[in-house]
Amino acid sequence: MFNAEIRCGQCGRKLASGRYLELIIKCPRCRAMNHLKAESLTPERPGAPRHGEDDGCKSNHPVARRKAPPGR
């Protein structure tokens, strides 16, 4: 998702400006339907691990190091 200038694929008229993941917009000039999709999805925060990936960091939280009591 990035800031983009969105133009009609048929006539080149500027239709919008902004960020999008997926957009369907009809050109008022030539009536062409423009269907646009983001080329690739990026994590919400750059450098953030993707879902299911380990970031390689160990937790410093005291509960993370606690072992379960025997018998549980």
Image (tube, helix red, strand yellow):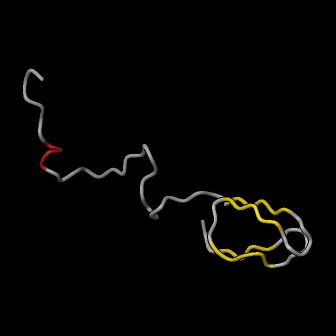
- Give the quarter of the image for residue 66: top left
Q: Nearer the viewer, residue 5 or 56?
A: 5
Q: Is residue 23 above or below residue 6?
A: above
Q: Residue furthest left?
A: 70
Please state if 50 lies on the left or on the right of 41 as rendered.
Answer: left
Which residue sits at x=84%, y=78%?
13
Count of labels shown? 0
Residue at image location 79% in from the left, 74% down from the top: 7
Position of residue 57 measured from the top left corner of the image (x, y, whole percent): 29, 52
Based on the displayed image, in which of its 4 quarters is residue 48 positioned? bottom left
Q: On the rendered structure, is 16 left or right of 27?
A: left
Q: Position of residue 25 (x, y in %)?
A: 77, 65
Image check: 63 left or right of 8?
left
Quadrant containing the N terminus in the rendered view: bottom right
Front position in the image: 41 or 12: 12
Residue 33 percent location from the top left of the image? 84, 62
Who is closer to the viewer here, 39 or 37? 37
Coordinates of residue 40 in the picture (x, y in percent): 63, 57
Task: Pick whichever, 29 or 65, lies toward us.
Answer: 29
Write the residue at 92% across / 71% down. 30
Quadrant in the picture for the C terminus:
top left
Residue found 54% across the figure and 59% down from its top: 42
Residue 49 located left or right of residue 68: right
Residue 17, picture quadrant: bottom right
